[in-house]
Image: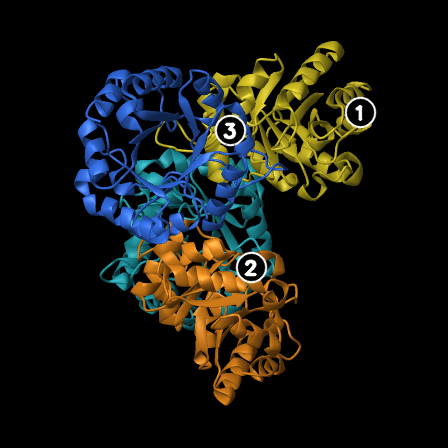
Chain colours: A blue, B orange, C cyan, D yellow
Amino acid sequence: MFVLVNLKAYPCDPIEVAEAARDVSEESGVRVAVAPQAAHIDAVAETGVETWAQHVSPVEHGSHTGSTLAEAAADAGAVGTLLNHSENRLKLADVDASLEAAERTDLETIVCANNPDQIAAAAALGPDAVAVEPPELIGTGTPVSQADPDVVTGAVEAAAAVDEDVDVLCGAGISTGDDVVAAGDLGASGVLLASGVAKADDPRAALEDLVEPL
Amino acid sequence: MFVLVNLKAYPCDPIEVAEAARDVSEESGVRVAVAPQAAHIDAVAETGVETWAQHVSPVEHGSHTGSTLAEAAADAGAVGTLLNHSENRLKLADVDASLEAAERTDLETIVCANNPDQIAAAAALGPDAVAVEPPELIGTGTPVSQADPDVVTGAVEAAAAVDEDVDVLCGAGISTGDDVVAAGDLGASGVLLASGVAKADDPRAALEDLVEPL
Amino acid sequence: MFVLVNLKAYPCDPIEVAEAARDVSEESGVRVAVAPQAAHIDAVAETGVETWAQHVSPVEHGSHTGSTLAEAAADAGAVGTLLNHSENRLKLADVDASLEAAERTDLETIVCANNPDQIAAAAALGPDAVAVEPPELIGTGTPVSQADPDVVTGAVEAAAAVDEDVDVLCGAGISTGDDVVAAGDLGASGVLLASGVAKADDPRAALEDLVEPL
Amino acid sequence: MFVLVNLKAYPCDPIEVAEAARDVSEESGVRVAVAPQAAHIDAVAETGVETWAQHVSPVEHGSHTGSTLAEAAADAGAVGTLLNHSENRLKLADVDASLEAAERTDLETIVCANNPDQIAAAAALGPDAVAVEPPELIGTGTPVSQADPDVVTGAVEAAAAVDEDVDVLCGAGISTGDDVVAAGDLGASGVLLASGVAKADDPRAALEDLVEPL
């Protein structure tokens, strides 16, 4: 299982979470990565944790003020990027162009989507992985694997029907190791997490709990 | 072959084009529809021509000022809608929600896209049809069937791989009957047209030329 | 006082509201207008009521699929347009371009904004009027003139400091004649209404109540 | 005069430009700052040059994946931010909210706009400065101070009419010291530059030339 911790714009210390994620990953052997603000990629990557961007823009080098250039994210230390998160929905053509930008710079890619139909659409664009996150469950603390297991199995089937090589992650409401196990049992090869770790009083303990049953 | 004339925001007389399309369709037996500005759907539909919306918003009834509600378009006489035209690109989640809005109101749907990958993604969302229009050819007068036949056959294959029931149209640069025939030979079941008819000195003659070889 | 009834995407009968607004306006001498969906402008204008668009796009004639062309709205019978409603926020540059489009077609303009600073900004772009609508009060039934009178007087002062010729309307939560009178007492020269009329069981009675104390 | 070098998404070495800007600023006494990609703010700020963000998002701490949080930009070393650049146009309400975010984190602010009307609107929102950049001149090498001096003096007058404390910069096509002097003569207190430095074979020489006549 791959555990990706999305720090969003939370008021956490990204270095503290990054160091915890690095240590927990090393100790448990579970793959754990952290996706900080673009301005923190550099500092987070220096901790040695696997570092992801939260987004890259659908652009190449050029006149694009305020963009998040894939090359800059990679240069600062990112090795992957989320795309089309429900808090950052992209145009269909821009998901395609951002995937091209990520591929150009060897960033691994996860395209988020709301439901199995959109997962199939995302998978058709050729990312490394897709992630299904029902928007209504994000931040609720009720895990998608429990609240809506059919959306996870539906996403796994929908992606496989389009491209068997595309991994499927799930997210929304996941905060315990049991949630991660349940996600894996439904066919997911990883989970997206955010507040469960980033807003925890003790991010390290939260991460240890997450990987413990794996 | 289905010929859909997109009037965009062109300075044409929508009623003149509508009446010509109606007559040419009746005389030739070729299916011809017209997609006017939302504010003209009513008047265009009254001519008896098959009338399409250029877009419907990804919303239901509610507090959505400035939206193009599918129910209002249908109520005014539209029987179908374009979605995600390259001049009106939508978020992936909004293509999905606009399709749901169209289905709710029995509007037929064509989702536009740039290339075979995006066509596969669009097809995965379950529209009635998809249309491939390479943006760089729109308005050029060089037909896609001649300038880039591979993008048409690629789109036909990409859509079929995802869902065999989704028709494929093509657009960009089409202005003559030979272009329409060539599109059909490449596997398209229809064409999107715009300036070739809407900006013609004589729209009726342009339409007659288009359907003549069919 | 000017009473503008925004029908948004509500499931009302636009003709019923339009006829009621026309009659109430004629009987009371109060200026009342209705802003329907673009696809309903034609039918609403035919009732004889003053008809507004909910939005026009920042474009001229040309290749703009899915736009709401000012010329088409005017052609269908609109004499004015809302712009930048909180449910349809525009880029600063697009407010400017939409105002230009409206001016080109002799549409009267009201630019909406959230607070006095944004009202000053909107006024600087030269519309006929601005409207302050605190988003948190929209649809609440609690009138802005009562819940937050300072935002109305602040908007009146902010607009006057930039351009004394720009009228100020207010909206959000207005549903009774007393609310309209209170808005006028705070310096507003009109009100924006929506659900209070459009979702009323009896729109005509709701409108009669609104204009009664004027 | 304030010289702000916007690195956009150019394929330059941000550290090389930053070091050159730092040295030229120290040697000449002219204020020079550099605005890199968000992912490069950290490394650029470490050179000691004054560092700006190209954009900050209209958000506070919270669930905002892919945003550019003002706190993160400030934390990484930015002391100011551009907003509403013509390559990153914002909604009017978002210019307001991004200014609030910048103020919250003590970032100095420059709001860009196309023309004097929009400059007045931007000034009404209370930034530290505004910058007029006619989009049609960006990247042309023809300086705005020469191609369209009226837009600069018009912007200076428009901003002063709204708020005398708001500085006015200008941009588009500026690449030589004479251009900077001409901008100052028209009333600008600074200039925005991009390709003239970022794409120069020798950024240091380009900067030295720029500040030489000051």
Q: Which mark is residue D177?
A: 1
The residue where tag 3 is placed is A73
Task: In this rendered view, identify the residue nearer to me: D54 or A103.
Answer: A103
The answer for how far apart the CA atoms under marks 3 and 2 are is 34 Å
* Label 3: element kind: helix
* Label 1: element kind: helix
Position of C174 relative to C23 (above/below): above
The single residue placed furthest to the top in the displayed view is D27
Query: Visible in this render: residue A131?
Result: yes
Task: In this rendered view, identify the residue nearer to me: B90 or A31.
Answer: A31
The answer for how far apart the CA atoms under marks 1 and 3 are is 33 Å
The residue where tag 2 is placed is C64
Q: Horizontal and vertical percent for residue C33?
A: 41, 60
Badge 3 crowding class, 10 Å Cα cut-off, few under 14, some 14 to 19, many 20 or more, is many
Badge 2 crowding class, 10 Å Cα cut-off, few under 14, some 14 to 19, many 20 or more, is many
What is the three-letter code of the residue carrying label 2?
His
Badge 1 crowding class, 10 Å Cα cut-off, few under 14, some 14 to 19, many 20 or more, is some
Q: Horizontal and vertical percent for residue A184?
A: 23, 36
* Label 2: element kind: loop
Q: Quadrant of residue D36?
A: top right
The single residue placed furthest to the bottom in the displayed view is B27
Task: In this rendered view, identify the residue nearer to me: D42 or C45.
Answer: D42
What is the three-letter code of the residue carrying label 1?
Gly
Q: Horizontal and vertical percent for residue D81?
A: 55, 25
